[in-house]
Amino acid sequence: MDFNVAAGLTFLGNGFLGYIIPFLFVLTIVVFFHELGHFLVARWCGVRVLVFSIGFGPEIVGFNDRLGTRWKIAAIPLGGYVKFFGDENAASVPDAEQLASMTDAQRKGSFFHKSVAARSAIVAAGPIANFILAVVIFAGIFMFYGKQSTLARVDSVQPESAAATAGFQPGDVVLSINGRKIDSFSDMQRIVSTSAGETLAVEVDRGGQVLTLKAAPALKEIKDSFGNTHRVGVLGISRSMAPDDMKLQPVPPLDAIILGIGETWFVVERTLSYIGGVVVGREAADQLGGPIRIAQVSGQVATAGVVALIHLAAVLSVSIGLLNLFPIPLLDGGHLLFYAIEAVRRRPLSERAQEVGFRIGLALVLMLMLFATFNDIKHLWTS
């Protein structure tokens, strides 16, 4: 629901296929596993699944499985849905007329006649599948590619920077930040980038002597390797590029899974931190990207290789799973909110209340899409 058909139009003059193919590859993987989560738990709960669709609009190709589910690929491959028996549409709005006329036998396969617990499990299964997919991808990268890390050794300190004010010196090795162990320069960057304006207790090893420095990262706009601008916290230090400080280590399966969970949680934490920053005015809302930005980033990342593109799929999977848990009617989180209210009241909300909720949810989602698309166009115009 958070993507739109305008996604590829900007790139017609700049290698259209080079952007749109990686974009659709990444998006299709993420959407498929999200909908597969809904599908599998629905089948397990005895719900009839009428349609499993990748994309919206007219069907391009499809088939019926032995239980009557129509599996299809639709013309607008910018999302997907699973339609249950009793749904009026792809957003799982109940079909009141159909529900009222169901026989006892039909009710057994109806989504809306299942218990609150069963419906909640089915709805939550989509975002959970996204998180599981992300953990599996991250863990797979660690197992088969390895974990690349650079020792958190300071190579240089920028004059008048936060690091210079705190007393950092070249050769310092960062051991911990606020009590959290630092194993690599990337570990340090992750904490610093989300801690602009906060005073951090940084423990360093300086020639065998352990010191604690107080540093407050400054909020600055930086450009990544693809030219995209981000507002992050920075200390003003550069990493060591000495060969002895850089290594690529293979990771055993169990450790890889643990690291995969950690990576997934980092994306969740970073996303929530950004949203919180927008609310309090610490972060700029213009960093919010939509379909065009995702397509652009997908094309750029694809030039770095398959591993980088798959890594992007994992990041997007976490983001989409988290977004769908927001308590906005029309999203999975909105349905879960309705079911929570139903569990407390011991009866569902009225049809009128649910209809109003879905309309509000649709308006919010459309406004978010329009705002994100506006940001995308502005970003492309200014860059």
Image (cartoon, rainbow, N blue to C red):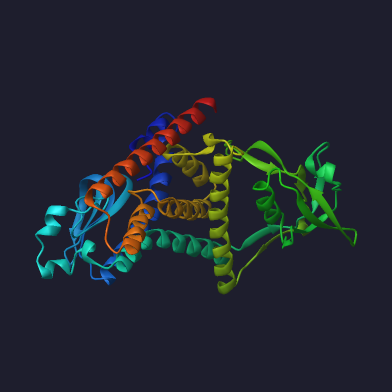
Q: Quadrant of residue 258?
A: bottom right
Give how far across and how far down residue 192 sits, in percent.
69, 49
Give how far across and how far down residue 27 sits, in percent.
39, 49
Q: Is residue 157 left or right of residue 366?
A: right
Residue at 29% x, 42% y: name it.
359
Q: Is residue 240 left or right of residue 130?
A: right
Q: Is residue 76 visible?
A: no
Q: Is residue 186 left or right of residue 119?
A: right
Q: Is residue 103 above or below residue 359?
A: below
Q: Is residue 166 above or below residue 220?
A: below
Give how far across and how far down residue 355 sits, in percent.
25, 46
Give how far across and how far down residue 70 sits, in percent.
19, 58
Q: Residue lying furthest top in this view?
A: 381
Q: Quadrant of residue 123?
A: bottom left
Q: Residue lying furthest front in this view?
A: 345
Q: Is residue 272 above or below residue 283?
A: below
Q: Is residue 304 visible?
A: yes
Q: Is residue 78 above or below residue 11?
A: below
Q: Quadrant of residue 133?
A: bottom left
Q: Nearer the viewer, residue 300 or 373?
A: 373
The number of callouts visible is 0
Residue at 54% x, 37% y: name it.
287
- Give the position of the C terminus as an image quadrant: top right
Q: Is residue 211 left or right of residue 184?
A: right
